[in-house]
Image (cartoon, grey):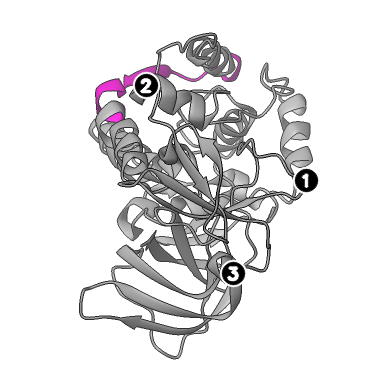
Amino acid sequence: MSGGVDSSVAAALLKDQGYDVTGVYMKNWTKDLPGLICPWKQDYQDAKRVAVQLGIPFKVYDFQKDYRQKVVDYMTSEYKKGRTPNPDIMCNQEIKFKLFLDTALKDGADLIATGHYARAKNGRLFVAKNKDKDQTYFLYRVGSKALAKTLMPIGEFNSKAEVRKLANKYQLVTANKKDSQGICFVGKVGIKDFLLYELGAQPRGPIIDQNNKVIGEHDGAIFYTIGQRHGLDIGGGLPYYVTGKDIKKNEIYVTTDLQDDALWKNEVSLTDIFWISGLAPAKTTKLQIRLRYRLPLVAIDQLIKNASGNWQIKLAEQVRAITPGQSAVIYTGDQVLGGGVVV
């Protein structure tokens, strides 16, 4: 129970369905940042209040050390290498559906439940009925054994309004609490502010346009991602888009042409591939891929494992701003099969 409305309603529903429910708050991050207070105390108190309202036991699992090593350090390391990682995906893989699951099972649980907008059935993962809130993109690295031990009741609702209506029916203190935004473990802080806090100020360097002309200066190449438009601080009228960067040279490359070939690709290479079932899909399976959260699905024309162990994917259409370090998630219909990290 995170202290949000989704996990609160999940607990209430499962209790109503006859499950013997225990609420658990995961203490992952408690550090305040300059000018920003970490919301963990409020979230913990809200989760505890809901548990009291529901008349269920409540526990706290302290995972701060593991979180630092497996999520935060991973994230900062990837940014330093010039990639754009997904810390939420690593959190689900290493903390929620590994460490939390193992700890809960040792603690006497038969199953775990979360407030995710997704559906777990017989060790398989399916998109939520509420497509607008679907979170399967962040869950593709959760294996079938963990999914077989997981309940996701919120995935069965068609809208967030339905969830809030139920929360009000149960008179939960979190019924009208706003959804959390920002990095998964820090609250409302933006990624650049967090990286500045963790890594300090970075050396400035040149911004180079499509004509190989230096048109400005950036405040650290690690802070920029492919396709980014805002935060470049370049005058001149037309918007600029980041097409690439060189961490060693500390250079950022931009263009004013939204149709620039450097921005669009119909091929992608994936490393660190993960299949939920443990097996790659059959060649005859019709596949789609999501190359960033909320990006529309794109049909896959060809999926081949190359000699280096990476997977080469040919797309049915060109996609803008495919970004190294981001995850690409592979679907067949409403089922998530797995995915990998963009090279």
Q: CA distance from mark 3 to mark 1?
A: 26 Å
Residue occupying the far front of the picture: 213
Tell me the residue at 73%/20% (across/down). Answer: 171
Residue hosting label 2: 200
- The three-letter code of the residue at mark 3 reads Val
Tell me the residue at 54%/8% (across/down). Answer: 35
Q: CA distance from mark 1 to mark 2?
A: 31 Å
- The three-letter code of the residue at mark 1 reads Gly
Say if residue 334 shows up in the picture. no
- The three-letter code of the residue at mark 2 reads Gly
Question: In the rendered structure, which segment of residues is drawn in magenta?
Answer: 53-67
Residue 17 sits in which quadrant?
Answer: top right
Residue hosting label 1: 237
| Circle 3 or circle 2, nearest the eye | 2
The secondary structure type at the circle numbered 2 is loop
Position in image of residue 56 (x %, y %): 49, 20
Q: Which of the two discs, 3 and 2, labels the residue nearer the N terminus?
A: 2
Position in image of residue 216 (x %, y %): 56, 40
Position in image of residue 262 (x %, y %): 54, 67
